[in-house]
Image (spheres, rainbow, N blue to C red):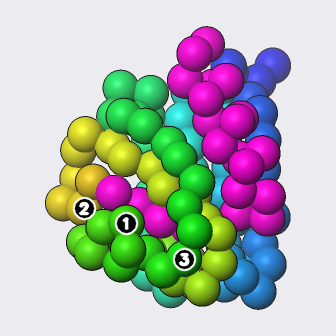
Amino acid sequence: MAKSSNILLYESKGSPKSLWNTYSIFSDRIELQCRPLFTILVISKDAFVKVDVYKPPVIRTVFWALKLDLADFYTHVGIERNCGMLKKLRFTPTNPQEFKQKVIEWAEQ
């Protein structure tokens, strides 16, 4: 029997825009794979602050955001968290508007 924390609610598979990173929403967390840094960033509901969709370039929205992929060149999602050295993350899921909507639904659960 699977734990509730392992229930996958939404997944954006890797693409050239995302540098083949996968971005997933689970029932208790968001996981952002970052292949260039060889890591997966985990955002819990407690750490989540807000989500939005931005048009390029990232520098126009905030200079010190951590870009996980080619967000400078494409419409992308920005997540703000309340912990970590860089609190603003920018990344390019396959469908940014849909990803944003799924995060909002996840945060309201």
Q: How many marks?
A: 3
Near mark 1 (Cα within 10 A), the count class, few <14, some 14-19 or many ≥20, is few
Residue at image coords 54%, 76% = 56
Q: Secondary structure at mark 2?
A: loop
Decide: few, some or many residues near mark 2? Use Cα within 10 Å; few <14, some 14-19, many ≥20.
few
Q: CA distance from mark 1 to mark 3?
A: 8 Å
Q: Does the magenta segment cover residue 107?
A: yes
Residue 87 placement, left or right of 94: left
The answer to whether 108 appears left or right of 49 in the picture is right
Query: Which mark identifies residue 61?
Result: 1
Most distant residue in the top direction: 109
Q: CA distance from mark 3 to mark 2?
A: 19 Å
56 and 105: which is toward the camera: 56
Q: Residue at x 66, y 84 (%)?
A: 19
Ranked by sequence position, the earlier of labels 1 and 3 is 3
Q: Quadrant of residue 103?
A: top right
Q: CA distance from mark 2 to mark 1?
A: 15 Å
Span colored in magenta = 88-109
Task: List x then y, in percent, for residue 82.
Answer: 25, 40
For marks 2 and 1, the one nearer the N-term is 1
- Badge 1 marks a residue whose secondary structure is helix
Residue denoted by label 3: 56
Give 29 or 18, whichever is nearer the viewer: 18
Please provide percent x and percent y for residue 81: 33, 43
Is residue 76 depicted above or below 49 in this figure?
A: below
In this picture, is 20 found above or below 48? below
Toward the left, the furthest residue is 85
Label 2 sits on residue: 86
